[in-house]
């Protein structure tokens, strides 16, 4: 049988690329492919000496950078599994640790006291072993990486990725997004860094808030491509202060909703660059994408038109044959999940043009850790007797021809107006120049109050009459806030439940039988604007 341990790819690259730089961290430190491989081998020997065994779980509590990848790859070399928990609230971290209990914690010295009372805790070793052991034998479906979805609800769901899956995902990303075409790439996304290592691409890895450091590294290393989340890209454009960024020819952005205003800002600030909006889910990355090189590009026109019409966010054309997409009405999905047997004929009959998005295919993750939330999986009996597993992404979408639009998250359909989802309102709001961030929620009580919470761009910005008229027509309360609560992972996704609590704290509620609409001037729109 073939050893599918992914660190074997690193060994091959160490021999093939040698002194080529593998990783540059945000402080400018670098490591070649050869040196990275040597450090991984030494660290794996140290982990074995500490008693780490195959298939055990190690919580990796080190900030992304060179040490992070040395540790991650060393754990995988041993044949153990890496557990990653994105920084966030203490409650969420504890929930993750309850869902998946690690056998070890590998962290930096100053964090040892935080974990040592409950877990066996290790730190990176700098000792050199006389001979590092060979990479552990791992089958293709052997567990490698356990992560948690970062959705807007804050609920815990662990996804385990195998060694074979990570290789397959890297191949699909390269095929779809030309990952290996650029010699040097800057990114804030560690998963893409792992894929870059497979293809010998030099990765400049920076933190999601390290925009100024990123600009210095761009000037020094001249990367042609950048992959990041929307919030980082926005911060980079704001912090550039006239710096020449003409080296950047490709901008790939994903991990959160991509609004027309961001694409327009990139096209204006980086006119030489092509912007690619990448849509994916924790179960499959990527699902679809579209590229824009100017405001006359069809992708940009579709994005802007879809938002202005209240359709939601344009995601691109469904051209990737490696992903099978299925759209089901929420009621049909709930019923099918309870059925003992679901056939392909059932799906053909119930497939809808708008509803809950499910995915299956080559690079779609096949399961959750210990089958957590197995109700999200739909096993479908095919006509040839095989079984295809579809995963519910939690996203609500519309499909028009072969084009996909994102409308919101499952469970967030409006109680005030059927078929309305948050992104449909938010995308429309953000087509207006005055709006920075936007989030649509509904506050329950004797009845429901629909609220569009927004931030304004600058102190001199004023709400546009068209937006006020839209909210009045749709019976939506328009509230101006200083900032909206966002996820800790990318700083791009609105935390809707937290926003609801903040609005209630400001005194927003809806009396029975009355409508609340905005008629005030911007200076006194809400208590939140004070």
Image: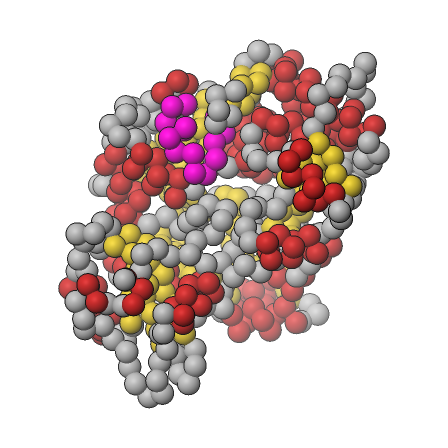
Quarter of the rendering containing residue 384: bottom right
Viewer-side residue, 371 vs 19: 19
- Where residue 71 sits: x, y (%)? 67, 30
Magenta-span inclusion, residue 208:
yes
The residue shown at (41%, 66%) is 502
Magenta-span inclusion, residue 324:
no
Viewer-side residue, 481 vs 253: 481
- Where residue 448 sits: x, y (%)? 39, 79
Q: Is residue 209 above or below residue 9?
A: below
- Where residue 411 sits: x, y (%)? 49, 68
- Where residue 16 sits: x, y (%)? 61, 14
Q: Which residues are magenta?
A: 202-218
The residue shown at (63%, 16%) is 35
Viewer-side residue, 478 vs 143: 478
Q: Quadrant of the N terminus?
A: top right
Relative to 483, 281 lies left or right: right
Number of marks in picture:
0
Q: Is residue 162 above or below residue 38?
A: below
Q: Quadrant of the C terminus?
A: bottom left
Quarter of the rendering containing residue 354: bottom left
Residue lying at the far bottom of the rendered structure: 513
Relative to 340, 434 lies left or right: left
Relative to 229, 374 lies left or right: right
Give the colour scheme shown. Answer: secondary structure
The residue shown at (70%, 44%) is 115
């Amino acid at each position: 049988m073939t050893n599918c341990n992914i660190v074997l790819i690193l060994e091959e690259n160490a021999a093939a690329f040698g002194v080529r730089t593998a990783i540059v961290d945000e402080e400018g430190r670098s490591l070649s492919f050869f040196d990275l491989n040597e450090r991984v081998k030494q660290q794996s020997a140290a982990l074995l000496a500490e008693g780490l065994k195959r298939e055990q779980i190690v919580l990796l509590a080190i900030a992304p950078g060179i040490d992070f990848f040395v540790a991650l790859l060393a754990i995988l070399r041993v044949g153990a599994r890496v557990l990653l928990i994105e920084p966030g609230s203490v409650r969420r971290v504890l929930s993750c640790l309850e869902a998946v209990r690690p056998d070890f914690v590998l962290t930096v010295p100053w964090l040892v006291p935080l974990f040592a009372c409950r877990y066996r805790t290790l730190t990176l070793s700098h000792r050199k072993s006389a001979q590092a052991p060979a990479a552990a034998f791992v089958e293709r479906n052997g567990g490698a990486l356990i992560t948690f979805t970062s959705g807007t609800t804050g609920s815990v769901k662990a996804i385990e990725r195998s060694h074979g899956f990570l290789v397959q995902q890297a191949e699909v990303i390269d095929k779809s997004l030309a990952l290996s075409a650029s010699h040097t790439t800057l990114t804030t996304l560690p998963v893409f860094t792992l894929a870059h290592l497979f293809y010998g691409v030099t990765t400049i890895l920076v933190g999601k808030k390290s925009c100024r450091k990123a600009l210095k590294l761009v000037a020094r290393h001249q990367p042609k491509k950048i992959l990041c989340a929307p919030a980082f890209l926005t911060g980079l454009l704001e912090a550039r202060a006239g710096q020449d960024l003409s080296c950047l020819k490709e901008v790939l952005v994903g991990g959160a909703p991509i609004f027309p205003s961001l694409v327009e800002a990139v096209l204006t600030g980086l006119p030489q660059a092509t912007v690619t909006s990448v849509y994916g889910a924790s179960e499959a990355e990527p699902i679809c994408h579209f590229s824009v090189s100017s405001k006359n590009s069809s992708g940009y026109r579709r994005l802007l038109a879809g938002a202005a019409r209240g359709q939601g966010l344009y995601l691109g054309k469904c051209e990737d044959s490696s992903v099978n997409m299925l759209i089901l009405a929420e009621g049909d999905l709930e019923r099918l999940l309870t059925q003992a047997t679901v056939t392909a004929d059932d799906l053909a009959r119930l497939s809808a043009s708008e509803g809950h998005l499910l995915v299956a295919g080559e690079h779609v993750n096949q399961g959750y850790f210990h089958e957590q939330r197995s109700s999200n999986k739909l096993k479908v009996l095919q006509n040839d007797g095989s079984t295809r597993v579809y995963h519910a992404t939690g996203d609500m979408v519309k499909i028009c021809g072969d084009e996909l639009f994102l409308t919101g998250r499952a469970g967030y359909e409006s109680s005030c107006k059927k078929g309305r989802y948050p992104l449909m309102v938010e995308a429309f709001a953000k087509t207006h120049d005055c709006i920075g961030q936007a989030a649509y929620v509904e506050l329950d009580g004797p009845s429901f109050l629909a609220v569009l919470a927004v931030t304004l761009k600058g102190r001199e910005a004023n709400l546009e009459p068209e937006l006020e008229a839209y909210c009045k027509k749709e019976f939506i309360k328009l509230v101006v806030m200083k900032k909206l609560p966002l996820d800790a992972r990318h700083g791009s996704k609105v935390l809707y439940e937290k926003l609801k609590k903040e609005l209630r704290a400001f005194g927003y509620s809806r009396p029975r039988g009355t409508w609340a609409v905005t008629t005030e001037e911007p200076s006194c729109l809400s208590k939140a604007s004070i």
